[in-house]
Image (tube, helix red, strand yellow):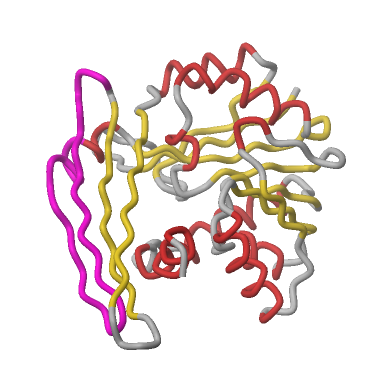
Amino acid sequence: MSQYENFAYIYDHLMEEVDYDKWLTFIDKLFKEHNIDSVCDLGCGTGNMTIPISQKGYDMIGVDLSEDMLMVAREKAAEAGQDILFLNQNMKEFELYGTVDAIIATCDSVNYLKPEDIPQFLKWVHNYLNPEGLFVFDLNTEYKFKNIYGNKTFSELGEDFAYLWENQYWPDKKVNEYYISFFVEEEDGLYSRSDEYHMEYVHETRWITRQLEDLGFRLVGIYDDYSDHEIRRESERLTFVVRKV
């Protein structure tokens, strides 16, 4: 397997602790309240949100930069009997064939965008939303980067894989870096090693809200990790819901 094939394979193992059911419940309730039919999932990865939302009856499009992640997503969608259009595109400059009722970007996808890329990204989101359409996205907070991830090392040994995750947070730059080495067992019993480097940026709530409002979005609410709870200083993930006006 290639490096990205290895990462796509192990990605779902890394995400096992994510409460996708909770996210789905929040999003489905929101979409029903706003009569949403068509949805685009930006940074969809292996389809962990795209497929369950499709199973709720929404017309889905998934967009991701990694073709290997999309290969896994397509296989999972086929097994689930879901007809989903997957597009291999960079989410910061994505193009759709038409407009949709809602766009989502879950699992801190927006944290991967540099601050200077945010205004153009939001323009594309606004462009591909129908009038009164919803944009739902989440952000990892600085509290999470600083206090939960920090300068720590995480590891796991699975039945046919292992990974070592070294984390570094730079408070002066508002940047969080991940160095991940993972090992996947091949057919001959030997393990192949691949290395990943990821960088996420802190986007302050006031700043991102101002960018949204400047581009013609109206804030519906900011919530604590796909719940009805108000955000707190200790919130690790903020969920933004905005509407195109």
Q: Is residue 81 above or below residue 34?
A: below
Q: Is residue 108 above or below residue 154?
A: above
Q: Is residue 21 left or right of residue 38?
A: left
Whether 60 is among the magenta residues is no
Q: Hey, which residue is sitting farthest top in the picture? A: 214
Q: Position of residue 211 (x, y in %)?
A: 55, 16
Q: Hey, which residue is sitting farthest left in the picture? A: 152
Quarter of the figure that contains the C terminus: top right
Q: Is residue 222 left or right of residue 24?
A: left
Q: Residue at x 42, y 62 (%)?
A: 7
Q: Position of residue 168 (x, y in %)?
A: 19, 38
Q: Is residue 12 above or below residue 158?
A: above
Which region is colored magenta?
Answer: 146-173
In depth, the one of 179 and 114 nearer the eye is: 179
- Residue 156: name its quadrant: bottom left
Q: Hey, which residue is sitting farthest right in the picture? A: 98
Q: Is residue 49 left or right of residue 195?
A: right
In depth, the one of 199 and 212 nearer the eye is: 199
